[in-house]
Structure formats: structure tokens, C-alpha cells
Image (cartoon, rainbow, N blue to C red):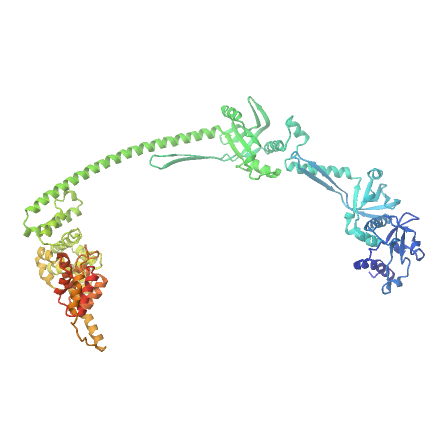
Amino acid sequence: MVEPPELEVQRAALVAPAQAQEFGRPKPMCWAEDVATGNAVHVATLPREKTGSACGCVCPACKEALQAVNAGRDPDYFRRKGARGRFFRHTSGHTRDACLKLAGQVAVLQTLAQGDQLHVPGPRRTVQLQGLSGDFYLGAAQGGARTLRVTRRSWMDIQSASLTLEDGRTVWLVLESRFSVSEASKFDGVISIQVDDPDVAGMSAEEILARIDLQPQSLCWRKHWDDAQLDMQAHLQAEQAAKDAIDWLDDEERALLGGVSISRESALHLAIKNIIAQAGHILAPCLYLADSIQLSNGKVLTTQKTFDLGLMQLRHVRLEHWMPGIVADIFCQSQEPSGLHDLLIEVVVTSPVSEAKSARIRERGLRCMVVDVALFAQPGPISMAALKDHVLYSTTTKYWLHHPEMEAQWGAALLELQRNAAAVEQELQMQQERLEHEALQAQREREHQNAQAQAHRGAWRQELMRVAPSELPELFRWAVTTHARHERERSMPDCPVDIPSTAEAMERAQFHDTHNSELWHNQGLIVTLEMIKRGSPTGEILMRLREAVAGRGLRSYVTILLIAIRVYDPPFTPAERAALAQMRSQVRESIERGKKEFVRLVKHDRIIGRLYPEMAGGLQHEFGTLAYAIKQTGAMADVLFKLEAASKPQKADPDPTGGLHWEFEKLRRVSWMKGDVPFCADAEQALALQQVKKLAAQASRLQMNPLDVLTRAFRAKANGIHVYDWAKSLHPGTKVELQLVLDLARAAWLI
């Protein structure tokens, strides 16, 4: 919709002064009080002859005479550049904010009072109630917005007007600052204008109406014919809020409490009882009981029982029920699996159930459940809905003070636990006595066996003293086979021989190292040789040989076992002979390559040759011994050494033996290491050391026998021969050979 040019210019004439305030000019005031009529007048309605001081208007606030600037001018005037708008100006030239605010309120009043229809918001009433705790609860009721049709109006003064509606009711339209309770009583309704914006004083009537539509809170019902009904609704709402917070009791509930001091706790106590009474059911608390007894052996016997009655239906519920010596908060009958029973429900808000009351309940054998507010999961104020959930359907907010049937069942369970514990303790006592008796019997048996074994060892030592040294090897073999047989049969206490004393006798007869268990134990060399000589069982013979080849048995005696098999030729099956041939080939190839994994210890050759003379010829061969392995290693290394030496120019030693005498003289200050050698007991064990192996290979390249060098060293140390004399006996021809001899002794931890 396009506005006419006159209205556009008029609006520009009103807005121009408002824009001027952005540059520090006074805010425009377009409304004033007409002295002649006492009504509010807009500057745009004045004719030209009332411009300036001739307007006859005063400020509605300060009553100072006003001047109408540019009143009644032609609209074309305001199109000029720099033209000022229309407004009222104080004669003094000073316009206060208070003047603008009251002028704006008067403008709103004038605009509203002049219309035939008045759009007003709905009336609103609020009520505030104080609960039992002292907290306040607010209730509010809101009426609907409506349009009032005005049939008659009259101005009481510039700040108020009386409006008569079409239904005959009268409404006092008044500025908030003019409102008076005494005058309000004369009208059916009172609407106050609550405008506090100075800018309204510069608005036109149309703009004021638009503003009221957008901001209906500018109008407020101070009195309305529906106030009584709205007050009742607000009061009920506030009362319900207090009840929901369990902070209110109505008159009927207060009467139930009699002369008791009313507090929020009293309301909560009564609310819980009413909830249970109205519901007619309650979820019983789950009772879990457990006990244990520790036995003498440290173990624990435990018994446990859970009582869960679920959702209990309540009948004939009565509050504050009197019984002889007891006043129950709630007395009813509960439906349980065992039938219908009397039930007391006590509600604990602040004080627990007294000891005296608990004792009387137990004496009379009454079921008693306690609802304890302290067990609620939600601290502080609680709503009615949450309270119902806690009271009726939570198992953690209640407990059983007394339940005869549950206590009887639990007592029976405890008695059964004690009986079981006593029975177990009796069994443990009998078991302990039995174990002690068996331990005593075992001790006596061991003592008897030890005495028997001691007697056997004594008799055997006497027998050894009577045997000639030449007969000892055969006696040693018999003792070993007898010992192995008793060991297999697990009858060692009955064994008549003693291996350690027999080995000592063999040592005295110059048969050394017979104390070595590899010779005489059940899986040892002599027992295996006896099995091979006997020729059975061939399967076990082959198994022991296979374990020895694999390194899990008599690996150092593999060549001795192969010699025995060749000599005694056990009756192997074709498959066993094929396996035997494969193992023999593996051992031969390893020995011929100079490897030491199957090197034979020659220290037992003498006793083996004596016990098994058929094998003596095979044992005399060097094949399979450490010396043979060293030779093989030396031969292979010598070839490599010669090839390497041939490829390099050799520097001639001007004096290969020169200075050797002085090197020998230095050895007079060298001595053997005191005590036993920590890592090896003889030359063969010394040659198993990694450093000794490297030096032995060098010695072989120089045509030296490292086994002989170390054997003489061990013998010289044992016999107290000086290092100097031992070295001289080896006849080294050069410094290099002498140094190699000394290095071998150092690597073997001899010097």
C-alpha cells in the first residue's frame, strides 16, 4: 500500500527531529497538554495559526509553557534541505527525560482512549504460599487476551480516562504513576499503562498502536472481574506445587496429626503412609544373609540365604493403629507364599524405631518392615512421583526389622553350618591322626631300611676286604648289575652291595674313575654292555644307542657301544640293523671329519677291557678318541696352513732358537695355579674348552700333540713338578713352540 505524499511528508516531519538526536540534539516531544481542554494533543494536529507560543499547550509533566515548532506548515516545506520537523519545545529550551516519559504515557493514553476498540492482554494473577519448611511456592493463572468494545469514554484528567464497555462494565484506563487503589474500587476493571520509553513522546498515534500490538506488556490489568476465579486457580497451583514437594498439609491432614508440631518431616511421614495405604501393595526388601566358619586347616565353610517375597499385596490397611504397648505407623495383612500374615510397617524420617518398640515387636512375633528415608538414593527435597517410586518399588529403601519365618530359616541354616563344620573338623582330626600314624610308620620303616642298608654296607665292606685286588673288577661288575636290578625292582633297602665303597676299593686297586655314575647307574655303561652281551632286549639296546647318538645319554661312550655290538652281535631284526647301520655311518663320518661330539673317553678303557676282554682289541685302536680327532683336525688345518703359507712370502728367522734359554729362565718365576682347576679335571676335559681347542689346532699344525702336552701338565701339577721342569721336558725347539705350550697351560687354567 502506497502512502499519500502528505502522510509521507508528515512522517518525515516527525522523524527528522528524532534523527537529529543522533547528533546531540534534544529528543523531540510531539505530544502536549492542551490548556483549554485538558486533553493530550499531537503537534501535527495544530493549525498554522497555533504555531510557536500561540499553541496554548503546556508540558504534562512540568507544566511549563510550550512552543509548537513548525505547526501547520505546508508539507512541501519539509522537503527542503535542512528543514526541521514539527515538535513541541519548552520555553526554557530544556526538555527533561521525565517530561518525555510522561508525554509518551499521555500519548498512549490519548491514543487508546480515543479508539472504539481496545486490544488488551489477558489478566494474570499470582499467589505465593509458604510451605511447612519455610520455602515459598508460586502459583499463576493467566486469562485470555481479548478486544474490548468501548461505547462511551470520559476524561477524568490528562492521566486517566473512564471507558464504558458494551456489556456495561467500566474500565479505568490510567497511567501507572496515577493509579490509586481507592479510586480503582469504583471501576469493574483497571488497566494501567506502563510505558517508560522517552521515544514514545515522538511517535504518531499509528506508531503507538503498532507498538502496543507488539508489546502488549505495556498494558497491565490492575483489576479484573475474573480476579477471584484466577486467584483460586493460582492458589490451587501453588498448593499443588507445595504438596508435590511434600511441604504442605491440608486441613484434613493437619487434623490427623492432632497436637503434633507440624513440620516438613511430619508431612513426609504422613505422605509415605498415605502412599502405602492408597497403593495397597509394596515391594518387599530383599534380605541376603551369609555367614562362615574357618576350619583348622584354613579352609572356610560358608552358608548363605536370600529371602525375596517380591511384590506383596496389602489388605485392611490402617494408619496409626493402636495395639497393646505398640502404636504402628501402618498395620495391615500381607499376602505371602506361606499365607496371610499381620504386618507392621514403620516409617523412619528422622528418629529410628526405638529399642523398646523393637523388643515388643519381637516378643509378639510380629512381622515388621521399616521404610527408612535415610536410605533414599536422592538427597534433599523429593517430588511426590519420586517418593512413590522409592516407597513402593525400591528394595533398597526398606529393610526387615523382624520376620519370624525368615529368622527361623536362617537359624536352621546356621545350625546346619555348625554341624557341617563340626563333622569336617572331626574328619580333619581323624585324618591328622591317620597322617601322623602313617608318618610314624614311614619313619620307622626308613629307620629299619637305613639300619638294614647300613648292615648291608658293613657286610659288603667286610666282603671287599676279603677279596683280592685282581678279583675286584669282576666283583665290581656283579655289584653294578645287582645294584641296577634292585633299582629297577625298587628294592634298594634289600640291595646287598654298596657302589661307593666298591669304587673306593677299585681306586685303591688302580682302576680309576669307577666312582663315575655313568659307569654303574641303571642306564649306565656297564648295564648297557651287559644287555648287549646278553643280546636282549634288542629294542632297548637300539633305543639306548639312539639316545646316546642324539646326545641324551652315553654320548661319550657311543664308540664303546658300537664296538660291543660288533663283538657280541645281538640278534637285531633287519629293520633294527638298518637303523644301526645308519647310526654307525653318522658316528664314523663325524669322527673322520675331526668333530668331537662322539669323542671316546679313554680313561675307562682299562676297566672295560678287563671286564669285557672280547672288546680289548677294539679299544686299543685310536679311532674315535680325542687324540684321533685332534690329529684329524690338525691334518686338515695343516693343509690349509701350508696353502696359506705358500701364497705369502716367508720371512726367515735369523735365529730360530736364539734367546730360548732366557725364555726358559723366566719360567722359574712362574708357578702352577693353586687348588683344583675350576672347569676341568684332566686333559680330556680341558680340550673341550673353546680357547684350548683353538690352541690345539695351532699345535697340531706345528706337529705337536696337545693332548700329551696337557696330560703331562696335569701330572706335573699333581706331582709337584715345577713349571720350568715341565716345559723343559717337552723339548720345544723354538720360542713359538714354547709360547704355544704356555698358552695351552694358561687356557686350561693351570698357570
Q: Residue at x 81, y 52 (%)?
A: 200
Which quarter of the image is occupied by the N terminus? bottom right
Q: Is residue 538 left or right of residue 320?
A: left
Residue 548: image location, x then y, percent: 20, 58
Q: Is residue 582 visible?
A: no
Q: Nearer the viewer, residue 310 or 555?
A: 555
Q: Residue furthest top?
A: 324
Q: Residue furthest right?
A: 49
Residue 303: image location, x then y, percent: 41, 35
Q: Examine the rendered structure and indicate whether residue 49 appears above or below residue 343.
A: below
Q: Nearer the viewer, residue 576 or 196?
A: 196
Q: Is residue 348 left or right of residue 460?
A: right
Q: Is residue 257 left or right of residue 393?
A: right
The image quarter containing residue 742 is bottom left
Q: Examine the rendered structure and indicate whether residue 687 appears above or below residue 302.
A: below
Q: Nearer the viewer, residue 641 or 715?
A: 715
The image quarter containing residue 140 is top right
Residue 474: image location, x then y, percent: 8, 52
The image quarter containing residue 262 is top right
Q: How many marks?
A: 0
Q: Examine the rendered structure and indicate whether residue 32 appears above or below residue 244.
A: below
Q: Is residue 355 visible?
A: yes
Q: Nearer the viewer, residue 318 or 608?
A: 608
